[in-house]
Amino acid sequence: MTIQENIPLAPLTTLQVGGKARYFAELKREDEVREAAQFAKTRDLPLFVLGGGSNLVVADSGWPGLVLRIAIGGITSSNANDGKAVLFSVGAGVNWDDFVAQAVVQNCAGVECLSGIPGSVGGTPVQNVGAYGQEVANTIESVRALDLKDDRTVVLPKPACGFRYRASIFNTTERGRYIILRVNYRLKRGGAPSLKYADLQEQFPDRKAPPSLAEVREAVRAIRRSKGMLIVPGDDDCRSAGSFFKNPVLGDAEFKALAERAAAKGLEIPSYPALHAQRKVSAAWLVEHSGFSKGYAAGAAGISHKHALALINRGDAKASDIVGLKDAIQKGVQEAWNILLEPEPVFVGF
């Protein structure tokens, strides 16, 4: 294990903003992770775990402690006892889309709609990553992690992870306790692809036979590319942290009040049923109907020309520029719709 000092973090994130890490280590083995954690503990250094850097805003002041970049690799698969599923064990440092591609090649359903999402496998359980009707909680069997509190490696079964919309114990009740080492998934062999979302269904008009997993994967990637949500070198709209705000999930009374407010403006709220009696509302629609259109610019920060939820670094933005735009959007949406948008990215060093 090698500990480096004063390493710039901006190049390691998709948003490309932020300062330096006082200490930095890239770790490829589980024993290295434990050793690095001990290094931080004995020196009383704050610890931050960096994955693919895709859902992250690093402060201009950087990180005063140790940043661990988990690079544990490896994808293994085995047949489940029932013969209907395939179990995948995937290192936390594996590129997420590489794993999805391999699952599709093996004709295993369950993650095809999550194609093209940037970042590493280890980051997916933290926010219960989801898109187009799928989320990783649907397929995760267990998570292998280093428990910093008890200084031991543990395997947390799915129920212990506390998955819910864009959340888990890893970013709520037990934030900072675990370092994810591997994630174990159960996928359905030969399963049909998921086509729950209208914009995905529209990719296959007048099809009599259902599309294959590979066709759905490519359709999802095409949609993400059109929205600037696929990392494409040279595309300024991709210099972002992905969707910056969560879609609000409202109760019946809240949704009714929002709909009435919209109707008074001659507008109709697009929505779709969420869990139980709640309704999930489009954060992008709220942003665009609060004075912040696609292509909006605020100095060095801005909004993607392709998607209203992608806040972008227009070239030489600082973290403070991104946060300033975030604050302005939140204020505008709250004033227009009485809803406070909740950010999706992790904020480090603020």
Image (tube, rainbow, N blue to C red):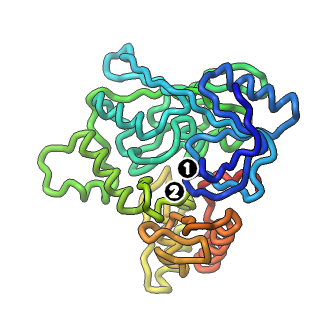
Residue 303 is situated, as x and y percent measured from the top left of the image, at: 52, 70
Precedes in sequence: disc 1 or disc 2 = 1
Q: Which of these two is toward me, 48 or 10? A: 10
| Circle 1 SS class | loop
Give the amino acid type for the residue marked by disc 2 in the picture.
Gly
Residue 289 is situated, as x and y percent measured from the top left of the image, at: 50, 78
User: Does residue 145 sit above or below 296 in this rendering?
Assistant: above
Residue 12 visible in the displayed image = yes
The disc label shown at residue 291, or none:
none
Residue that numbered label 1 is attached to: 54
As drawn, is 309 to the left or to the right of 150?
Answer: left
| Circle 2 SS class | strand
| Label 1 CA crowd tier, 10 Å (few <14, some 14–19, many 20+) | many
The structure residue drawn at horizontal position 14% and vertical position 44%, both measured from the top left corner, is: 209
Residue 126 is situated, as x and y percent measured from the top left of the image, at: 60, 40
As drawn, is 336 to the left or to the right of 40?
Answer: left
Residue 163 is situated, as x and y percent measured from the top left of the image, at: 57, 39
User: Does residue 149 sit above or below 7 in this rendering?
Assistant: above
Give the amino acid type for the residue marked by disc 1 in the picture.
Ser
Q: Which of these two is toward me, 285 or 217? A: 217
Q: Which of these two is toward me, 243 or 202? A: 243
The structure residue drawn at horizontal position 59% and vertical position 70%, both measured from the top left corner, is: 301
The structure residue drawn at horizontal position 68% and vertical position 36%, both measured from the top left corner, is: 68
Q: Quadrant of the C terminus?
A: bottom right
Q: Are marks 1 and 2 in contact (CB under 8 Å)?
A: yes
Residue that numbered label 2 is attached to: 242
Q: Which of these two is toward me, 22 or 123? A: 22
The structure residue drawn at horizontal position 42% and vertical position 60%, both measured from the top left corner, is: 272
User: Does residue 39 sit above or below 50 in this rendering?
Assistant: above
Mark 1 vs mark 2, CA separation in Å? 7 Å
User: Does residue 203 sit above or below 7 in this rendering?
Assistant: below
